Image: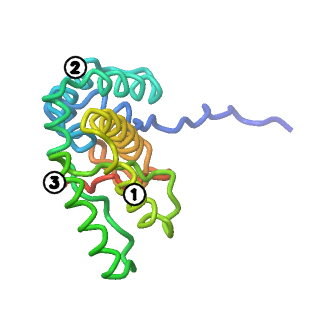
Amino acid sequence: MTRGPTLPAHRLPYLPTPLDAFNTAPADEARALLLHCLHSPRWSRRIADHRPYPDLDALLAAADEAAYDLSPRDLAEALAGECLPELPEDTYSAAHMALSAAHAAHEARFGHAFVLYLGDAAPDEVIDHILEAIRSRLANDPEEERVVAADELRRLARGRLLGLLSGAGLCSICGRRHVAVTSPNTPAPGK
């Protein structure tokens, strides 16, 4: 028995990754996306202008380096764009009041929003983690708090980039859904 000619192997179409879409997006769109990750136009411009990135690790390394290079003015600008981390929906109102009071004390002492990366905190420990961190950091002197806040912003930006370029939900660059763990501090598009 002889077989007829074989059909050519079926190839799946190439589907761009979120990083591919980011690398090829118009500069103003890439900068706008990056502003959701860290509210610093200079940082966003620097990351967007150095595209394309060969992989996500290269992008994250560039984002970290650019975050370490923030001037005091850039840092103040980035901090001005931050707000309190969102609490789980079932959080008691007393916890909200305690968090608001602690945040107000932090803002009065340091002149900027309290920032904290929560990507490694268990959902049921978020409120305790935030309150403990605020109480602890209220003891910092202003320069020490500036250094800690800059590091937390860097971690937030890194987590947000991961969430946007490899995370769950619709990617604001390519419009596709991606699956991964995202940080509770990842802002929703448009925030």
Which of the marked residues, 2 or 1, is nearer the chain's N terminus? 2
The reply to whether residue 179 is visible in this rendering is no
From the viewer's perspective, is residue 12 above or below residue 104? Answer: above
Any mark on residue 82, and which? none
Dot 2: few (<14), some (14–19), or many (≥20) neighbours within 10 Å? few
Query: From this viewpoint, which residue is outermost toward the right?
Result: 1
Label 2 with label 1: CB-CB less than 8 Å: no
Foreground label between 3 and 1: 3
Callout 3, which amino acid? Ala
Indicate the quadrant where residue 161 lies. top left
Q: Position of residue 48 (x, y in %)?
A: 24, 25
Dot 1: few (<14), some (14–19), or many (≥20) neighbours within 10 Å? many
Q: Residue at x 86, y 38 (%)?
A: 1
Drawn side of residue 28 relative to residue 52, left or right: left
Quadrant where the image shows the C terminus: bottom left
Disc 2: which residue: 49
Q: Residue at x 40, y 35 (%)?
A: 16
Indicate the quadrant where residue 97 lies. bottom left
From the viewer's perspective, is residue 153 above or below residue 114? Answer: above
From the viewer's perspective, is residue 69 above or below residue 105? Answer: above
Disc 1: which residue: 184
Dot 3: few (<14), some (14–19), or many (≥20) neighbours within 10 Å? few
From the viewer's perspective, is residue 123 above or below residue 106? Answer: below
Report the front residue among 107 and 51.
107
Any mark on residue 108, and which? 3
Which of the marked residues, 3 or 1, is nearer the chain's N terminus? 3
- Secondary structure of the residue carrying tag 1 is loop
Callout 1, which amino acid? Pro
Label 3 with label 2: CB-CB less than 8 Å: no
Callout 2, which amino acid? Asp
